[in-house]
Image (tube, rainbow, N blue to C red):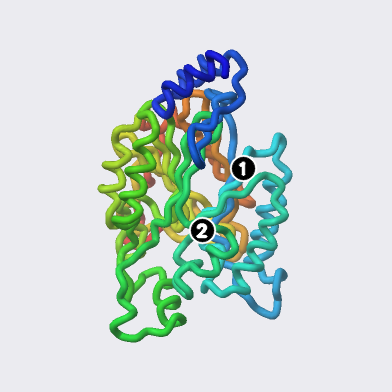
């Protein structure tokens, strides 16, 4: 093994992105660090792009792929396939199905199989609570995992874990799913990452240098926005504490179906658009960093919906671009976010939610 390889092995997982750049100058392509761990040092420090689609809420009906939610997901897949250059990979951000039915998930997998770039999947509550994720995991694999790409550490979490409130009253799987599918979640409990995954996350990140950029994918926002709609993760502060040693952390989340931006200490948070419908902004709790997207035409099925992409800069920070259909793209740069130049929520004209 060459001297450069020996140097990398010696430093192991403590290498920073900057160190990757130096060591990869000799053209080292990639180093296996142990079982299941691979650091892509050859491309360290390189900017790259990944795209996303999310919250398709596919409904199984006699219309099949002619249902408008299916047609919207097909439209997103086509738009992503038209990107030039292609993204390095595509994240699907959860809630592929509306009621977790096998037919919904299978139709979603079939539609997403048309995406040309490698696909990364994340689970949402609409995928999970009919059979507690059995079908989703059969189709897409692990609910929680991590991977390294071009010097950035990515983590995918299941952030829609809730306390068991269905066993004691003997709810059926359908009753449990219908309860979890409601926005106001009157019979449910707040989303959590949960102690088991937090322990996994601690252990996973213990192998990563604090200088290495970290990107977390979660379905719910990993902060507390509006509990009445479950725009909320109950153990968010505990997860943020686990992320606190890292210099550059970005969280990409689904669930809220809207342009949404926040920054808490060392963590930047970005919501993603839904392909199915936009939620209104919550009556309170919208972060001041958010430049709200108004939906002026509620009779247009595509207005307020869309897809988007994320540019990971050579610094390891992230610029986020929303691609709403029938609207101009909306870009949130890290530079603006760090300087507090995004946001300026317009004054309210009523006490109700914003659209």
Q: Quick check: 17 above or below 324?
A: above
Q: Mark 1 points at which residue?
A: 89
Q: Point out which mark residue 296 bears.
A: none
Q: Is residue 246 visible?
A: yes
Question: Which image quadrant: the C terminus?
Answer: bottom left
Q: Residue 204: where, in percent of width, then height?
A: 38, 42
Q: Is disc 1 surrounded by few (<14), some (14 to 19) or many (20+) residues within 10 Å?
A: some
Q: Position of residue 83 (x, y in %)?
A: 70, 40
Q: In the picture, which quadrant includes the N terminus? A: top right
Asked if the residue at tag 1 contacts the one at tag 2, i.e. Cβ–Cβ closer than 8 Å, the answer is no
Q: Residue at x 42, y 84 (%)?
A: 172
Residue 94's label in the rendered image is 2
Name the element at disc 2: loop
Q: Residue furthest front?
A: 1
Numbered circles on residues, count: 2
User: Could you tell me how far apart the alpha carbons at marks 2 and 1 are, in whole angstroms?
Assistant: 16 Å
Name the residue: 53% across, 13% down: 3
Q: Which one is nearer the viewer's eye here, 284 or 350?
A: 284
Residue 245 x/y as whole percent: 30, 33
Vertical placement of residue 194 versus 107, above or below = above
2 or 1: tag closer to the N-terminus: 1
Against 15, residue 108 (above or below) is below
- Relative to 116, residue 69 above or below: below
Can the viewer see residue 347?
no
Q: In this view, does 254 lie to the left or right of 101?
A: left
- Helix, strand or loop for disc 1: strand
Q: Which one is in front, 212 or 206?
A: 206
* Left or right of 102 in this view: 266: left
Neighbor class of circle 2 (other Cα within 10 Å; few <14, some 14-19, many 20+) is many
Task: Indicate the position of residue 218 as horizontal and vertical percent values.
Answer: 43, 51
Q: Which of 23 and 153 is in front in this view?
A: 23
């Amino acid at each position: 093994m060459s001297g450069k390889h020996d140097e990398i092995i010696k430093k192991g997982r403590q290498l920073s992105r900057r160190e990757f750049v130096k060591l990869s100058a000799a053209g080292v392509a990639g180093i296996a660090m142990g079982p299941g761990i691979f650091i892509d040092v050859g491309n360290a420090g390189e900017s790259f792009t990944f795209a996303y689609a999310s919250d398709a809420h596919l409904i199984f009906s006699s219309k099949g792929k002619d249902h408008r939610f299916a047609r919207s997901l097909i439209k997103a897949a086509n738009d992503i396939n038209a990107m030039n250059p292609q993204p390095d990979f595509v994240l699907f951000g959860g809630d592929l199905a509306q009621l977790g039915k096998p037919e919904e998930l299978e139709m979603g997998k079939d539609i997403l199989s048309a995406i040309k770039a490698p696909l990364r999947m994340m689970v949402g509550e609409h995928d999970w609570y009919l059979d507690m994720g059995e079908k989703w995991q059969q189709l897409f694999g692990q609910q929680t995992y991590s991977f390294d790409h071009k010097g950035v550490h990515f983590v995918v979490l299941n952030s829609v874990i809730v306390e068991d409130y269905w066993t004691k009253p003997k709810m059926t799987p359908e009753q449990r799913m219908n309860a979890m599918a409601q926005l106001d979640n009157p019979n449910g409990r707040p989303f959590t990452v949960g102690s088991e995954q937090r322990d996994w996350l601690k252990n996973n990140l213990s192998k990563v240098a604090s200088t290495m950029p970290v990107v977390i994918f979660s379905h719910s926002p990993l902060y507390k926005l509006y509990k009445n709609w479950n725009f909320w993760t109950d153990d968010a502060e505990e997860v943020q504490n686990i992320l606190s040693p890292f210099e550059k952390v970005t969280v990409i989340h689904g669930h809220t179906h809207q342009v949404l931006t926040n920054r808490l200490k060392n963590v930047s948070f970005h919501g993603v658009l839904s392909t199915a419908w936009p939620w209104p902004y919550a009556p309170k709790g919208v972060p001041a960093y958010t430049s709200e997207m108004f939906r002026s035409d509620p009779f247009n099925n595509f207005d307020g919906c869309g897809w988007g992409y994320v540019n990971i800069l050579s610094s390891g920070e992230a610029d986020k671009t929303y691609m709403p259909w029938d609207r101009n793209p909306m870009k949130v740069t890290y530079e603006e976010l760090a300087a507090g130049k995004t946001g300026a929520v317009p004054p309210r004209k009523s006490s109700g939610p914003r659209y």
